[in-house]
Image (tube, coloured by chain):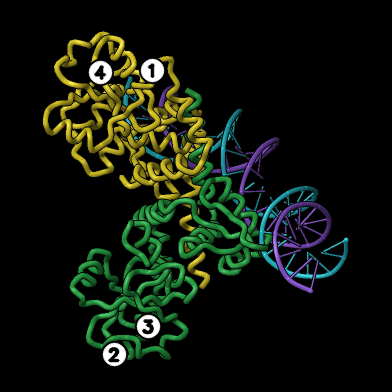
Chain colours: A green, B yellow, C purple, D cyan
Amino acid sequence: MTSQQDLLDTLAQVARALGNGHRLALLERLAQADASVETLATTAGLTVGNASQHLQQLRRAGLVTASRSGKQMIYHLTDERIVTLMGLLRQVAETNLAEMERLVSQLFADDDAKGALEAVSRDELLAGLKNGKVALLDVRPEEEFEAGHLPEAINIPLEQLEDMLDKLPHDREIVAYCRGAYCVLSHEAVQRLRQLGYRVRRFEEGYPEWKAAGLPVV
Amino acid sequence: MTSQQDLLDTLAQVARALGNGHRLALLERLAQADASVETLATTAGLTVGNASQHLQQLRRAGLVTASRSGKQMIYHLTDERIVTLMGLLRQVAETNLAEMERLVSQLFADDDAKGALEAVSRDELLAGLKNGKVALLDVRPEEEFEAGHLPEAINIPLEQLEDMLDKLPHDREIVAYCRGAYCVLSHEAVQRLRQLGYRVRRFEEGYPEWKAAGLPVV
DNA sequence: CTATCATTCTATTGATCGATAGAATGGTAG
DNA sequence: CTACCATTCTATCGATCAATAGAATGATAG
């Protein structure tokens, strides 16, 4: 059956669109919030022209759409499931590639005791929120926070962490989150807050995974 | 942070391994049962040398492993989640690429009324099995059936369908399944059995998805 | 130990991908 | 209508990928 293979070839095209680190970076940024080409280029460290080309490829693969807003083109993820897809890709890679483990531990390497690494799982966080024993801290930039965040979360962008400590409770454990599993913002925040005596841990996922799981966002 | 990008590049390598129709075909075959290089080459329509090379790529990406059995190398999927990953890729592609819809309808095109297309969902099948109102028919080749199948399923390979009708009950609805969403074996079986007067529908998934979902297999 | 078989490795060729620079397009503000 | 800005398109070049043929490896049977 040749059309069987045509189908697989088409699926392969979509997979190939995911097969480039810069495009994955663009998708991760889009999972935080819709963005213009220039914004995307900056956060991914690409020239505008190059970012545009990668975005065309993602568009051809049906992973993003674009709409015009004035002079700018605003790109969007077409489908929440793309976040899940990337998460699953990550899981499979982490489980089966030794290289991944090395890179992850390198990303979260610190002088500290590794206590800060003990991340809070989704179920644990849900339980803590339900019984009011946990305060949620979003350390992403304000722009991303405004585009969507977890309910009840307090936003303190990492750069302003020490300036806004009065917004943090002392009577509860704090759980910090940011963009996702590989985002180091919350990790950094946990380390700094621990040195200041706060009881704080890191959520092992981020805003996009929470939203993609169908959990409530604001 | 440069190691952030290293991580995404490594993830991209895994995605690139999925970015070829022939490799997806190899993975789909491996989702049915472990197999030798020659078997894999034959079912994917490749030369042995070429199949071997593709398998090396899958190995480097951590998607398959190999073990020697006598003269032969037997390949295995490293991880059940790869089936889930491909299923999610399929869902995203079907939702967002018009091309996919065209190819799928072409694959299942038939002269019949489209009644045969109404597939049974997983939940519906589970309910039907629980209350004993459904008989399960596995129309894959005997070899794949032997390597693993759904509990209570009767195996009648499609080629022998008309020869083994006595194994099929008349008092219950029959649900036929095969390799997965894009496998046409069960579709064909449904059409032929309907003409013979059986009450029969097609399971919308296949053995690998069932197993990957953690449901019991034999 | 030699012949054989299954598989992998190596080298080659054409095809596709990724980055860059510069031209072209499409919308906006004056 | 013109100047300007954000983005896209086009052409180019080096790098990587896919398929093929043929040599090399590794296990087994005699």
User: Which residue is found at the position 51% from the left and 44% from the top?
Assistant: A14
Asked if residue B85 is positioned above or below residue B182 in the image, the reply reads: below
User: In the rendered structure, which disc, 2 or 3, sits on the residue that comes first in sequence?
Assistant: 3
Task: Give the Cα separation between the discs numbered 3 and 4.
Answer: 62 Å
Task: Give the Cα separation between the discs numbered 2 and 1.
Answer: 70 Å
Same chain check for tags 2 and 1:
no
Q: Amino acid at mark 4?
A: Ile
User: Which residue is found at the position 16% from the left and 20% from the top?
Assistant: B172
Task: Give the Cα separation between the discs numbered 1 and 3.
Answer: 68 Å
- Quarter where residue A137 is shown: bottom left
Same chain check for tags 3 and 4:
no
Q: Nearer the viewer, mark 3 or mark 4?
A: 4
Q: Amino acid at mark 2?
A: Gly
**Marker disc for residue A111:** 3
User: Which residue is found at the position 34% from the left and 80% from the top?
Assistant: A190
Residue A167, image x and y in percent? 35, 87
- Quarter where residue B166 is shown: top left
- Quarter where residue A166 is shown: bottom left
What residue sits right under mark 1 in the picture?
B113
**Marker disc for residue A197:** 2
Residue C12, image x and y in percent? 68, 38
What residue sits right under mark 4 in the picture?
B156
Nearest the viewer among C16 and B172 is B172
Same chain check for tags 4 and 2:
no
